[in-house]
Amino acid sequence: MYRKILVAYNGTPESKSALQECVRLAPGPSAEIHLLVVVNPPQSVVIGEYAMVSMVGIEDDLAAEKKKMEQELEEGLAYLQQSGLNVRKHLEIGEPVPTITHLVDTLGIELVIVGHSRLQSLAMRWWRGSTDTLLVEKIRCSLLVANDPERKTT
């Protein structure tokens, strides 16, 4: 049985599937569940050194996104706690893959659970890569990729 599990969550149907998979594993109350929400900085900050963009309003956008993600974090926390799980919450600002990788290393995580979206365009997968694909290369633990069973594939 996994003793330390990290669940990546952002409120999307795919990430809700990650929560459900964690509960289905029935890790028990002795397991540490780490619920992670990552606030992505606006793209203009991420690519700022390569593009001339206006920085006006960046802090406001980031604050609004952080507030939204704090609410998502509380909803995910409540869902897992209602299932009797021992949950620690984490709200981080940055890119998901490096953030998850850092927590895996520092917390001794044994399993990461992420949701997967099949709706991401080919161009986005090419440009930035799929989060779960990049994680396979970066983390040193098991990875469970959850898919929304209600979502139809094409």
Image: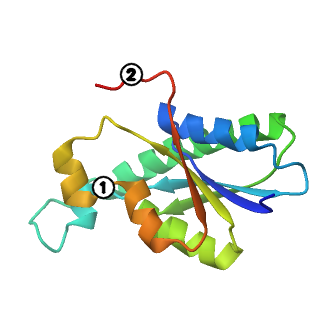
Q: Nearer the viewer, residue 95 or 67?
A: 95
Closer to the eye: label 1 or 2: 2
* Quarter occupied by the N terminus: bottom right
Q: Which residue is mark 1?
A: 42
Crowding around mark 2 (Cα neighbors within 10 Å: few <14, some 14 to 19, many 20+) is few
* Quarter occupied by the C terminus: top left
Asked which colour scheme the image uses, the reply is: rainbow
Q: How many marks?
A: 2
Q: Is residue 33 left or right of residue 124?
A: right
Q: Residue at x 61, y 77 (%)?
A: 105
Rendering coords of residue 8 (x, y %): 56, 52
Rendering coords of residue 74 (x, y %): 67, 41
Residue at far right of view: 30
Q: Residue at x 66, y 35 (%)?
A: 20
Distance (Cα) linking label 1 and label 2: 30 Å
Amino acid residing under circle 2: Lys
Q: Is residue 40 visible?
A: no
Q: Residue at x 10, y 66 (%)?
A: 51
Amino acid residing under circle 1: Pro
Q: Is residue 102 visible?
A: yes
Query: Of the residues under marks 1 and 2, which one precedes in the sequence?
Result: 1
In the image, residue 146 sits, relative to residue 98, either above or below, namely above
Q: Is residue 22 left or right of residue 98?
A: right
Q: Quadrant of residue 2?
A: bottom right
In the image, residue 99 sits, relative to residue 118, either above or below, namely below
Q: Which residue is mark 2?
A: 152
The kind of secondary structure element at disc 2 is loop
Residue at far left of view: 52
